[in-house]
Amino acid sequence: MTWSLGVLAVLLAAGAAMLSVTVDDAQARVSAQTRDEVAQAAAEASTALLTYTPDTVAADQYAAGERLTGEFRARYGQFTDTVVVPTSRTNRVTSTATVTATGVSSVDGDDAEALVFLTQVTSTDASPDPVTTKVGARVDLTRIEGRWLVSDFEPS
């Protein structure tokens, strides 16, 4: 009888260990998938925020705004309506951003932070020679109804 209880205890311990490893492995996979989703959302939104042409700037910025949420979305909309759209149209500004690297700093439930590095190429009719700038930004994201949306964008 003592021997049976000892064997049972060992089997229960082994089962608990296997369950723990299985749960940890599942959490790691979810975490990796979530980090990939956050990185992709941050990269796509950053590119959209910084890419436009004079002829499509309003539509480009509206589409970029669909990737944003909260107070940042309101601030961004006001800034693009009063500065970006009129300036791009008047001065014929074209801006193209390309992501060169993205890293996820943290994920906590439905909130995440990523770092995005971009190359931005800008030209105007007055200065047709493109100017290339390296841009880094901290991007805060919030998951809303399964979509990661930008809640803040801080270029450095």
Image (tube, rainbow, N blue to C red):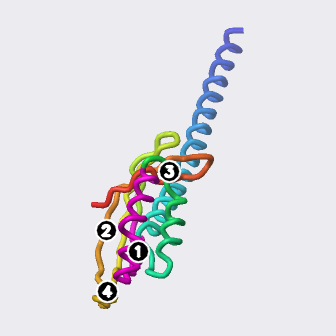
Query: CB under 8 Å between callouts 2 and 3?
Result: no
Q: Which mark is residue 135?
A: 2
**Label 2: which secondary element:** strand
User: Considering depth in this image, is 46 or 11 the residue closer to the camera?
Assistant: 46
Tag 4 residue: 130
Identify residue type, mark 2: Val
Marks 3 and 4, how far apart in space?
32 Å
User: Considering depth in this image, is 2 or 46 the residue closer to the camera?
Assistant: 46
Tell me if residue 90 comes above or below residue 108 in the rendering: below
Residue 2: image quadrant is top right
Quadrant location, the C terminus: bottom left
Marks 1 and 3, how far apart in space?
21 Å
- Mark 2 or 3 closer to N-term? 3
Residue at the location (39% across, 81% down)? 94
Within-10-Å neighbours for mark 1: few <14, some 14–19, many 20+: many
Marks 2 and 3, how far apart in space?
22 Å
On the image, the x and y values in percent for residue 146 come to 61, 49
**Label 3: which secondary element:** loop
Residue at the location (54% across, 50% down)? 34
Identify residue type, mark 3: Thr
Residue at the location (62% across, 29% down)? 14
Identify residue type, mark 4: Pro
Tag 1 residue: 97
Q: Main secondary structure of the magenta part?
A: helix
Query: CB under 8 Å between callouts 2 and 4?
Result: no
Tag 3 residue: 69
Query: CB under 8 Å between callouts 2 and 1?
Result: yes
